[in-house]
Image: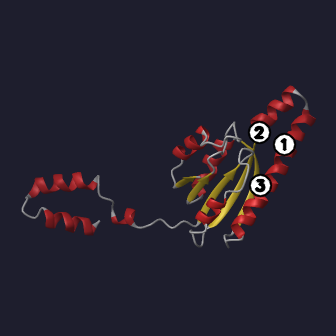
Amino acid sequence: MRYYEGLIKRKFKDLVGSKYEAIQKEYSEYILTEEEMRPHEIKKILLPLDFSVTEVSESICELLSAYENATVTLIFITDEQISDIIRASLDEEAGEEFTRKKEEYGTRLLDDYEHCLTSRNIPCMRRMLLGNKQQDILKIAPDFDMVAIPKCYASNHPDSCAVSGDAILLAQSLAQPTIVF
């Protein structure tokens, strides 16, 4: 902040007392502090996936390769609420079958993303969860420096793959830098 204080003092050196302080206060709302100007180092990246993400995005793998020394955590989330509805409306076996099929799909998707990232020398970790797609990401996200959200994430229409409203709401809810791809 000392640099900006010096800049303001030189620019307004002829103004006295309260005028200078008022101008400094007004500028402080628009000028980044020296700490804010330093780039935030990205070391841990979260990449959430679900059944609506249908294929590996080579562009995100390429983009994430720009973050040297970063580790990407891939998380596949199966919607627990849908599983519970299937169990309640059909039977326990149908709910288990739904969860098993989604986990098989998730394993293949995680394998594909892991291969894409490790081929670019990006270290990866992976997890599978049964839970709420938005709430679980909001709980986990504070442990990461950045979140990369697929544009189809949590979409009800994975075939069209336009940016889903859920992905936008999730991105707006996060406090850390977020990429929607």
Q: Nearer the viewer, mark 3 or mark 2?
A: 3
Residue underneath mark 3: 109
Q: Residue furthest top?
A: 89
Q: Which mark is residue 27?
A: none
Residue underneath mark 2: 80
Q: Which mark is residue 99?
A: 1
Asked if labels 2 and 1 touch by Cβ distance under 8 angstroms, the answer is no
Quarter of the figure with residue 66: bottom right
Q: Residue furthest front?
A: 160
**Which one is in front, 88 or 168?**
168
SS of the residue at dot 1?
helix
Q: Earlier in the sequence, mark 3 or mark 1?
A: 1
Measure how far apart labels 3 and 2 are at the Cα level: 19 Å
**Which one is in front, 126 or 5?**
126
Measure how far apart labels 3 and 1 are at the Cα level: 15 Å
Q: Quadrant of the N terminus?
A: bottom left
Q: Residues within 10 Å of mark 3 (few under 14, many from 20)?
A: many
Q: Earlier in the sequence, mark 3 or mark 2?
A: 2
Q: Residues within 10 Å of mark 1 (few under 14, many from 20)?
A: many
* Amino acid at circle 2: Glu
Residue sitting at 72 percent across and 63 percent down? 125
